[in-house]
Image (spheres, rainbow, N blue to C red):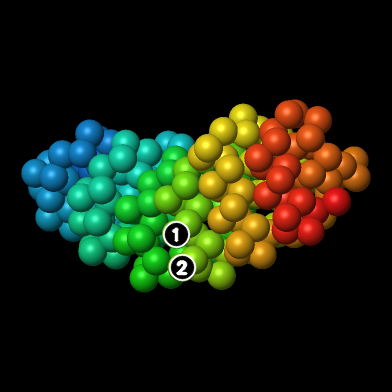
Amino acid sequence: MIRPYLAVLIWLAGGLAAAQTVSSAQRLHAAAARGDPKSLNEALSAGLDVDARDALGQTALLLAVQGGHNSIAGALMERGASVNAQAANQDTPWLLAGALGRAEMLALMLTRGPDLLIRNRFGGTALIPACERAHVETVRLLTSSTKIDVNHVNNPGWTCLLEIVILGGGGPRHQEAARLALAAGADPNLADSQGVTPLTHARRRGQAEVARLIAAAGGR
């Protein structure tokens, strides 16, 4: 007669432990998203995996990157958080930091083994969206401090240089992004999937200075 009760008690204890783990993970993610160091340390002191995932596959570090919380991101990396942990939408902390222009975070991640071969949901690198959005300091860091492929072609068929032209406005920041990409070896003649070159795109869009930079680099 004792065994059925014992089985029930074991089952309840297991359920309670699982609930506590979920609760700790939720606290960790909430603290990272808010940028709350006190709550973060409390959650981590419970012995939780620093790379625990939420329902969307996001880690605390990814949420810290999203929120722009540099000190939180640094603390998580000091605890061993992976910069390559990929969420359900294929974001990693490294890729998202590039897309959002988090140059300071990327600098911290450089010694944490970023995988330059992991692609985002558009088949792109950290550099391509950084160029598209003219995150100049991020583009400078990625092209000068990593071996990132400046001529990688994403799923839409665009390189970082093509995204600067096609999705940018041709203003000063996009001009500087183009200058940095070209200086890092971006091919000025690598065309899109329709065979249209960066220079042709720039001229069609009236981006005179960007067109001049591309032509000066040998673009046709």
Disc 1 and disc 2: Cα gap in Å? 6 Å
Residue at image coords 28%, 60%: 77
> Which amino acid type is marked by label 1?
Leu
**Crowd around label 2: few <14 · some 14–19 · many ≥20 (10 Å):** few
- Left or right, residue 98 beside residue 102: right
- The N terminus appears in which quarter of the rendering? top left
Residue position marked by numbered label 1 in the rendering: 141
- Left or right, residue 48 beside residue 183: left
Q: Position of residue 183 (x, y in %)?
A: 61, 62
Q: Nearer the viewer, residue 123 or 102?
A: 102
Secondary structure under badge 1?
helix
Query: Residue 34: in sight, yes or no?
Result: yes
Residue at image coords 67%, 42%: 210
Residue at image coords 47%, 57%: 140
Secondary structure under badge 2?
helix
- Left or right, residue 48 beside residue 97: left
Q: Position of residue 121 (x, y in %)?
A: 63, 43
Residue at image coords 34%, 53%: 105
Q: Position of residue 109 (x, y in %)?
A: 37, 62
